[in-house]
Amino acid sequence: MRSIRSLSHGFPFLAAGMKRKKGRELDNATRVLATIFLVSVSVLMFFNASSHYFDW
């Protein structure tokens, strides 16, 4: 849990640094990557919680 939190906290700074380096062309790419990352993390956490509550 701690690593996931540190990643989610450090990601905006990383994305901002990438934006500064490469410019606006990476803006959409970083946004898409951030959304995919957040969705995958939330889905994984949901499946972990549901597996604890329900025996599948």
Image (cartoon, rainbow, N blue to C red):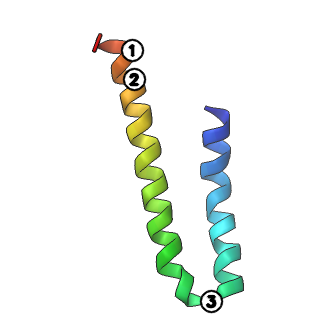
Q: Residue at x 43, y 60 (%)?
A: 35
Q: Position of residue 16 (x, y in %)?
A: 65, 73
Q: Residue at x 50, y 62 (%)?
A: 34
**CA gap, disc 3 to disc 2?**
39 Å
- Return the mark for residue 29: none
Q: Residue at x 62, y 63 (%)?
A: 12
* Location of mark 2 (residue): 49
Q: Position of residue 28 (x, y in %)?
A: 46, 79
Identify the mark nearer the N-term, 3 or 2.
3
Q: Amino acid at mark 2?
A: Ala
Task: Give SS at disc 2.
Answer: helix
- Return the mark for residue 23: 3
* Quadrant of the drawing holding the C terminus: top left
**CA gap, disc 1 to disc 3?**
44 Å
Q: Position of residue 47 (x, y in %)?
A: 37, 29
Crowding around mark 2 (Cα neighbors within 10 Å: few <14, some 14 to 19, many 20+) is: few
Give yes or no for contact between labels 3 and 2 (Cβ–Cβ under 8 Å): no
When asked about the image quadrant of residue 4, the answer is: top right
Give yes or no for contact between labels 1 and 2 (Cβ–Cβ under 8 Å): yes
Give yes or no for contact between labels 1 and 3 (Cβ–Cβ under 8 Å): no
Q: Residue at x 43, y 36 (%)?
A: 44
* Location of mark 1 (residue): 52
Crowding around mark 1 (Cα neighbors within 10 Å: few <14, some 14 to 19, many 20+) is: few
Task: Give SS at disc 1.
Answer: helix
Q: Amino acid at mark 1?
A: His
**CA gap, disc 1 to disc 2?**
5 Å
Task: Give SS at disc 3.
Answer: loop
